[in-house]
Amino acid sequence: MCGIVGYIGHRDSQNILIEGLKKLEYRGYDSAGIAVYTDKGLQVKKAKGRLAVLEDQLTGAPLSGSIGIGHTRWATHGKPSDVNSHPHTNVQKKISVVHNGIIENYIQLKEELIAKGYVFESETDTEVIAHLVSDLYEGDIVAAVRKAVKRIHGAYGLGVLAENEPDKLVAVRMHSPLIIGVGENENFIASDIPAILEYTREVYILNDGEMAVLTKDGVTLTDLEGGPVSRDTYRVDWDMQTAEKGGFDHFMLKEIYEQPKAYRDTMNPRIDGGRVVLPEVGMTADYIRDIRRVHIVACGTAYHAGLVGKTVIERLTRIPVETDVASEYRYRDPIINKDTLVIVVSQSGETADTLAAMREAKRQGARVLAITNVVGSSVARDADDVIVTLAGPEIAVASTKAYTSQLIAFYLLGLYFAQTLGTVDAGTVSATIDAMEKLPEQVERVLDQADVIKRVSEQIKDVDNLFYIGRGLDYTVVQEGSLKLKEISYIHSEAYAAGELKHGTLALITEGVPVIALATQEALFEKTLSNIVEVKARGARVLGIANEGDAEMAKSVDDVLYIPRTLPLLTPALSVVPLQLLAYYVSLARGNDVDKPRNLAKSVTVE
Ligand code: HGA
């Protein structure tokens, strides 16, 4: 989603802003801009498109000055265009604003401001902030911003500069991430740490409803009333290398190959002597015994992890589990009681739909457990219990290692509950743990078969449509495989419960239509094989994925890939890997921007 960078100090700011925004490119954006306090006052340059377009414009006419704000925009209100790009300014061009998020009452405010004579240039919700601050400005930008945020509803991470007070940079956070970097005679704001890591490791992570006033020499934190907030800086102990490509052509491929490590990192600290230990889950045994139902709520890939989580929890504990996409959950009036545990899953921990669903669940009295990859994220901070997936930073928009680490988190949680409830015996718990410990090495063996996938990707790259089929847990995994392909190859695909095809969709299976068939669930193997034979009989070209030793698969399909044997419950952690590789190689063969697919953003911080 959008990126914000701001600088106040002694160096030339343009370069710091542009380089900082580049570090946030992975979040996805459609336009970029900067505002710098120059010797001619506040100057703005902004342009639709990649940062390179903006850089080109700046080459001939740089903005020189040591205070500035920059932004990469992912449009929510008004199409991507030069004029809709941030920063936005007031009529006199003396106040400049960058904003991440959505101002929900912008129409009402806009009408009010227009009635007062303010002229709007853009279609954005953000521009109301610039005019509103201007309207409230009486010589003190901090006071004006404070008054303005009282009038706006919604989500905002803000950076504000005023030409009349060139010694201040004002930042505010409400439901949209913002951090402050503390340097020597220079300070920074950013929507994420990588943007400023080159300059400082000391950061303040702003909470909702907090404001920071930065000068060259210091940072003052307050609440929105101006009351003091005191907090220690947080020292960042990871470096940019962990967020770089490490020799792979794309972040996505690197992240696919990092999965064995992500499994180990997420799992190992939580396994001890054949049992699962989850000190971060503060539920008492009595509380766990009283859970009557579980709701798993998430979006996109995390939702698909939740589908696996449902089977895991139900099989291991016999507690009924419902799954919902977060954007639907809170509007469907879900039945939530004190004995409902709500599990939210979000890689970034900033997914707006998930956060909103989680707040609704809490409002109705549920306990919320979060599975997230980002320590200190909004989801992590607001949940009652948090299992952090230790997958490391995920940069590619298409999630891979975060998804599989979420699966590991669900296995751990399911086993932990089962241990407490005694719903499975100790032998089964330790046998499942043994099997989990083999997964990293087994993933490596799947990755060794990348050539099969490359070959199949060549056959698929020019088709318009294809199908994924599977039963049971395989059906949940093909849903993720299909999403992955759509996200980065732009080929239409559908995931179907294999037994459901004949109820309508079989009409779309004609000569040469590719079908990816997953058949790793022993109990369902014969049934899925029959469905494969049905699509073959209509001319489909089938890639079958089965367990090592299921030789019948090879006899029924055009191409086959075998995954190492594990427990049926654990197969998703292996069988999704060829589907991730397939999406990657098809996207590559089609010449797409694998890591930054069109129209998509990494961390979806708007509803
Ligand atoms: N609503 C603003 C900012 C959008 C945003 O934060 N996207 O992540 C706009 O549309 O410009």
Image (tube, grey):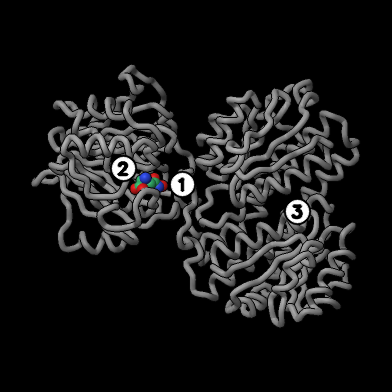
Q: What residue type is labelled 3?
A: Leu
Q: What residue type is labelled 2?
A: Thr
* Residue 286 in view, yes or no: yes
Q: Which amino acid does label 1 sit on?
A: Asp
Q: Mark 1 points at which residue?
A: 239
* Residue 345 in view, yes or no: no
Query: What element does badge 1 sit on?
Result: loop
- Residue placed at 87% from the left, 68% from the top? 550
Instruction: Work out whether mark 1 precedes mark 3 in sequence or the reverse, and give the earlier one.
Output: 1
Mark 3 Cα-neighbour bin, 10 Å: few <14, some 14–19, many ≥20? many
414 to the left or right of 162: right
What is the x, y in percent for residue 36? Answer: 19, 46
Nearer the observer, 347 or 136: 136
Quarter residue 10 falls in: top left
What is the x, y in percent for residue 374? Answer: 54, 40
Quarter residue 478 falls in: bottom right
Q: How many marks?
A: 3
Q: Name the residue under label 2.
A: 126
What is the x, y in percent for residue 345? Answer: 62, 41
Query: What element does badge 3 sit on?
Result: helix
Examine the rendered structure and indicate whether residue 598 appears above or below residue 146: below
**Of marks 2 and 3, the one in the foreground:** 2
Label 2 beta carbon within 8 A of ligand 1: yes
What is the x, y in percent for residue 449? Answer: 71, 70
Q: Mark 3 points at which residue?
A: 439
Instruction: Work out whether mark 2 precedes mark 3 in sequence or the reverse, and give the earlier one.
Output: 2
Q: In the image, which disc is placed on residue 529?
A: none
Query: What element does badge 2 sit on?
Result: loop
- Residue placed at 34% from the left, 18% from the top? 228
